[in-house]
Amino acid sequence: MSENDPGPFHEEKPDMHEEKFKDRESSGNSTLDKVNDALAEAMGPSDTVPGEPGGYVEDYSEEELAKVAEDHGDRRVRTENGGHITIERAD
């Protein structure tokens, strides 16, 4: 029996991980794929839609920004181009 020969009693077993997650997209790194798959199995699927960007969107509406500035005691000033800047109050 050579170093590379597993011997007559060695049986190739299918990789159950690969079979279970065969339909998912690979990152190109099998170790990272296994970690991602283990996390998905433990925590459930992510709330992202395939093909859509992940993350979340903050409310940056003028009303929300004005409210935050007012709550902090800051002042919002309209610029020449129609945008706003927030001037932080000095403590």
Image (cartoon, grey):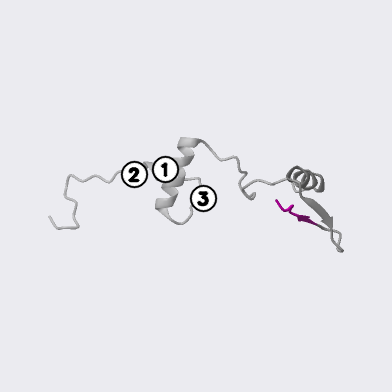
Q: Is residue 75 above or below residue 45?
A: below
| Identity of the residue drawn at 56% across and 40% down | 46
**What range of the chain is rendered magenta?**
85-91
On the image, the x and y values in percent for residue 83 come to: 83, 58
Quarter of the figure with residue 59: top right
Mark 3 or mark 2: whose residue is earlier in sequence:
2
Q: From the viewer's perspective, is the residue at label 3 or at label 2 nearer?
A: 3
Res 60 seen here: yes
| Identity of the residue drawn at 46% across and 57% down | 28
Mark 1 or mark 3: whose residue is earlier in sequence:
1
Q: In the shown orientation, is residue 58 left or right of residue 81?
A: left
Query: Are there few (<14), some (14-19), or many (20+) residues within 10 Å of tag 3?
Result: few
Q: Which mark is residue 14?
A: 2
Quarter of the figure with residue 77: bottom right
Question: Is the residue under label 2 in contact with that under label 1 (CB below 8 Å)?
Answer: yes
- Could you tell me the amino acid type at mark 2? Pro
Tag 1's secondary structure?
Answer: helix
- Could you tell me the amino acid type at mark 3? Glu
Residue hosting label 1: 19
